Image (cartoon, coloured by chain):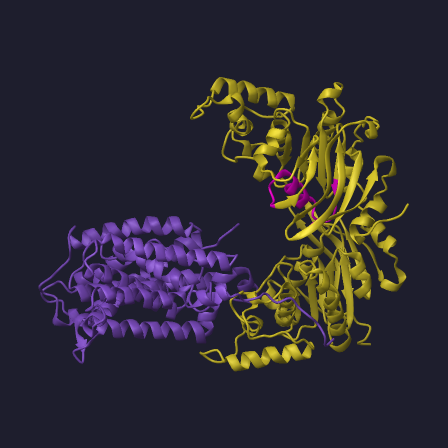
Chain colours: A purple, B yellow
Amino acid sequence: MGKKTYIRKKKGVKEQLSRVFLFIALIVIAGIFQAVQTRFLMVNNIMNLLATSSIIGVLALGNMILMSAGEMSFSIGAQCTVIGAVFGKLLAGETSNNLFLAFVLSVAASAAIGLFLAFCTVKIGVPTFVCTLAVATVIDGCTQLLNDGTTLFSKFWPAGFNLMQMKIGRLVPVAVIVFLCLAVITHVVYEKTRFGRHMYAIGSNPTAANNSGISVTRMRVWAFVISSVFFGFAGMIAASYNNSVSLTMGSELMLPAIAATMLSATFLQIGKYNVPGTVLAAILMIVIQNGVISAGYPIYVKDIVQGALLTVAVAAIAMIKEDGLPSVKLDS
Amino acid sequence: MVENQAILRFNGATKRFGDFVAVDHVDFEVHNKEIVSIIGENGAGKSTFCKMLTGVYSIDEGEMYFEGKKVNYKNTTESMKAGISMVYQERNLVGMLTGAQNIVLGHEPGRGFISERQAYERAIEIRDRLHLTIPLDVPVEELGAGEQQLIEIMRAFYNNPKVLILDEPTASLGEGEVEPFLDFVKNVRNTMDIAIIFISHKIEELFAISDRIAVLTDGKNTLTDRVENLTQIQVITAMLRTGKSYGRVPVAEKDFSKLPVILDVEKASYDGEEHHLNFQVHKGEVVGFYGLVGSGRTECAEALFGLRKAEKSYLFNGDTITRCNTRNMIERGMIMTPEKRANGMFKALSLVDNICNLFLKSGLAGKGAGVVKKAKSREFADRILSDNDVKYQSPGQAISGLSGGNIQKIIIGRSIAIENISLLILDEPTNGIDVGAKFEIYQKVRQLTDDEDEERRIGVLFISSEIDELLNVCDKIYVFADGNIIQGFERNNFDKQNILSVAVRGKRTDG
């Protein structure tokens, strides 16, 4: 046997460079804002940035779980808002101030939404795109009902409701700690456990996964449930951090969150949604938003920059990976 | 004696899909340290049979014995556990995982956390056992097709299988990769306790590798013997279908050397390779393309018609064509009907819309925005429907309600209605339609080429996997293998066995 030569695909400089594109973009963009507005990179503002990123970040992590399993949801903003509203409403009464109970019930509610979506898509077979769009509309209606059609706020909220705003050592907001903990846990699950490995496998090649004895159906149900719980977390963090639940709280965050997930697939291993990339991209999204505001540009500049970045990143993936990404197949 | 007992035996294996018998009372056995090949034409039942062995398909009739015990697997997990591993024809790897991670996929070692070290060691152990040297720590998407194939085989060895089924393993390999791969399979047979079932339709490969060869034809086992008792001709003869009796369609005799050439092709480059395509189509001629699945017939036609990116230069009605798209080819008078009927119709639309959509440019719709002229369209559609003997209830009914044969008649009927049509390319036009409708299509094709009015005659390119229909309807048959035209046969030289032999061996026959 011994001597055999097999054809190996070459890795080009183009691909190597694009692996760290996200990181370079973050540094360059932060640098530009720093040059325009010298207070941009002060510790206080950085903490503020990170705290805001944590909401989008948790949303994007949930979305990553869903997209890595080959699904794509348009209800993530709606789910985020409604769970925030449920959480707020549960604590809004004069006597209802059991934070832990409210938390558990909210998590249960988000898991129930995830199960329902899984039932519709995995069991009945409604295309995820259509199903999540329809369910998002229903959820939005429910949010209006909970909020009485306006921003939810209650003077009876217990002191602990604002936990996410509080700072540890007068510096680091709790929201950031929660975000990083969730990110680390997700990362470990995805890189080190069978569960995460199988999640990647079903998104990337369901036939292969099935032939390897992995239950694709069961994994997809888990993906829906866990991601919905994450969306719920994001909603609760947002409610707590903002000290209110506006009707558009989640929907404003949905596109940047989806963008963050997509951008993560350009980081390190092209075509694989991953946690470090998602965290980095979520921060980048907020850096752009915050930078545009603090530099005094009109707010729409944020949309243009975020959108352009996403376009470049996804185009790069399309050029390098012929078969596209899980849940975003590029058939040609 | 253990030596003589088959490790896997199947008596009277039968599988039906509705009325269609895919596998028909096949007796089969394989012994330890033996390579048994299954060969057959497209759709002969090879893959179906193997999927019965692994439990993908349930057994309708017959008894299967594994190591002397009667078994009936419900799914692949059961058969895998017992020791039957199959490497599927399609790629089954997760691209972003490494070779080692793919090999242990579904059985990752370690509690809670995956032990990457154990996984890697396990994979390396399999690799060493198979005497391979492929790197297992890089994502498999960075490896070549041959390496990926070997990783799939390593994966099949994860459970120490006693029977290994390889479904067309060489189909995805490049030229230089096939021979080392065959050596590898033989080496596995020599050094390990394993029985190998090898499916292929490339006959040279089978003779190089097999201990025994089993031929499947229309689901029946027509021949099984040790390779040293067989000749290639015997195998090819056994592969020939017994031929369902179609009526012979009348064919007018013509001297094509005196007739104008419509299409003249020599070679073209597409899909990264240069293909030798030396053929002509004359006015009034039906030219058949025969070959096994994957032999490149459709690709050739698509390249000529502008559906497939290609570097080419050929003559069409005297004009040299180097760049084209389908629209200007249709304007020049060439049209192709797709292999899958579904790609030739607008499922939910009416017969009228299906017929007229191709002609909205030429008079059925007004200028500018192109408002469709309803009465004119209806009249036009009625004409096409009656000219082609389509059986239908009303022109407004959805096309999906018609039978396959009638849909095909509409597709062909509207195609030949294009202005100045001179070449019609039919890709598997009789696929899945009944014998009567097939015959009507042959008649239609001959009528187009043998028209009383010589001026109206056109050329037809007829792509088919059914050798009998080509022998029936064609004036000339070109045989494809590996993307190239290997040999052409004139009607007076038609010889079923010769033609099949060229297709299977990929080499010219003399005489």
Of B446 and A7, nearer the camera is A7
Q: Tell me the quadrant of the picture where the C terminus of chain B can be found.
A: top right
Image location (x, y in percent) of residue A52: 23, 66
Give the quarter of the image for residue B161.
bottom right
Please report the residue visible at 75 percent of the width from the left and 55 percent of the height from the top. B201
User: What residue is rendered at 19% in x and 66% in y?
Assistant: A241
Drawn side of residue A316 relative to residue B304, left or right: left
Q: Residue at x 82, y 62 (%)?
A: B207
- Report which quarter residue B19 is drawn in: top right
Residue A76 visible at all = no
Q: Is residue A74 above or below residue B284?
A: below
Kindly give the residue lying farthest to the front in the view shown: A35
| Label total for image | 0
* Side (left or right) of B129 relative to B368: right
- Is residue A17 something one can see in this rendering? yes
Residue A94 horizontal/vertical position (percent): 9, 65
Q: Position of residue A196 (x, y in %)?
A: 44, 70
Q: Nearer the viewer, residue B301 or B9?
A: B301
Q: Quadrant of the N terminus of chain B?
A: bottom right
Left or right relative to B93: residue B428: right
Foreground residue among A42 and A210: A42
Please give the range of residues in magenta: B289-309
Q: Is residue B87 above or below residue B41?
A: below
Is B147 a magenta residue?
A: no
- In the image, residue A22 sits, relative to residue B232, either above or below, namely below
Q: Position of residue B330 (x, y in %)?
A: 60, 31
Q: Quadrant of residue A155?
A: bottom left
